[in-house]
Amino acid sequence: MATSKNLQPNSLWQLFLIFLKLGLSSFGGPVAHIAYFRDEFVTRRQWLTERSYADLVALCQFLPGPASSQVGLAVGLSRGGYQGALAAWLGFTFPSALALILFAMSLSSLDSSAMVGVIHGLKIVAVAVVAQAVWAMAKNLCPDRARLTIMAITSSIVLLIPSPLIQLLTIIVAGLVGVVLFRVNDTGSPESLAINISFRAGKIALSLFFILLIGLPLLVQLFPNQSQLVVIDIFYRAGALVFGGGHVVLPLLQSEVVPAALIGNDTFLAGYGAAQAVPGPLFTFAAFIGASLESMPVWQGALLSLIAIFLPSFLLVIGVLPFWHKVQNNNKMRSALLAINAAVVGLLLAALYNPVWTSTIQQTEDFVLGLIAFSMLMFWRCPPWLVVILCGTAGWVLTLV
């Protein structure tokens, strides 16, 4: 891990504030979040090298759940242990969760069309942020023809066959190809997060993950009238079994809560749209659903749902990281990671086109605004929060013209 040239956070409060800033400004979904994190922790603070960050992203792509939030949890663990992970999660999650809870409470009185222009401008920021990250990561992680080819093939496959399972398979195949193509020198050691988690703690976390995954449905069968238990089970399974992040979990939750009459379909769709507009992780949509439940008070339902859907991520990150560090010391795994990192860049490139570009750049003005935002980030080194504000304002102005 690289040594920070900036002042390292001396308190959990400072760590919380760093992630709170990201939670307030990280628009655009999980791919954009990974790009925002890279700018913050690799480029600005230099807490991680490009390679160690890519390794961490690759690991989180393997795990079910929200990859960007899991990256944030791992960074928090490295800076402040378990409390650091909690501070990072609270900072990154709080803004969007609170916004969606308030939206649920005032749904009947809001005019959703009023913010269309601002939201579109914020989506254009995401295009620029992801493009910047793909450019920089490709430059560092795909320095030769072999890895550029792996990047291009991965991107082509996941675009032609859009499926979370295909994404996972391409990463696995890339790793196998890397073992064959690349040779790692025995000298030196891989760059990794400095996380002090024992193997015992990792085993306990993984055991608890599977105990809850198996045990909660059984408890619901035994106590079907316990509404809190039903909610915890639904959201824990969603967080534990979904590959592909927030864009996949939203329709999955619809199939769980709407047929069960926990909330109405119109309410669900209104929240679905709002979740696309707020910064931070899409998994905070769980807070909207929880706040909309008629079976329990607003804040109780929101907090239960939110904690339940993110709990698997905590357990998986804590459970896997100790073993991941050991695996990284294996030369074959290090060879595989060279190709896996190239494949991750390919996944980001594919996501830059679909859904980030295709759902956002719809006319000439959009392209021009995106080009300006990209130039501000890439060449003028403007802070992302400033670009977010300017593009949101520009999107609003364009609706008035």
Image (tube, helix red, strand yellow):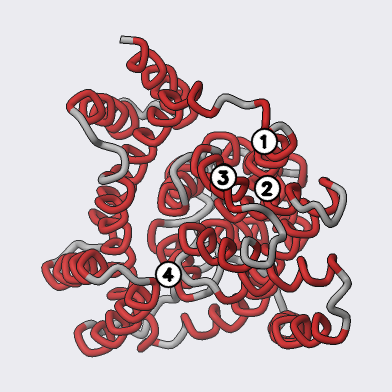
* In front: label 1 or label 4: 1
At x 49%, y 29%, the residue is 385
Q: Residue at x 44, y 74 (%)?
A: 190
Q: Which of these two is toward me, 221 or 115?
A: 221
Q: Give the number of the mark in front: 3 or 4.
A: 3
Q: Position of residue 357 (x, y in %)?
A: 27, 44
Which residue is found at the position 74% from the left and 65% from the top? 308
Q: Where does the image place residue 16, in percent across and percent down from the top left?
A: 71, 43
Query: Residue 212, percent across and down?
Result: 75, 81
Of badges 4 and 2, the one in the foreground is 2
Residue at the disc numbered 1: 103
Which numbered disc, 2 or 1, marks the residue that appears first in the sequence?
1
- From the image, tell me which residue sits under label 3: 280
Please report whichever mark, 4 or 2, sits nearer to the chain's N-terminal start.
4
Choose the circle earlier in sequence order: 3 or 1: 1
The C terminus, quarter of image: top left
Q: Of marks 1 and 4, which one's residue comes earlier in the chain?
A: 4
Indicate the amino acid at tag 4: Ala
On the rendered structure, is 39 left or right of 135? right
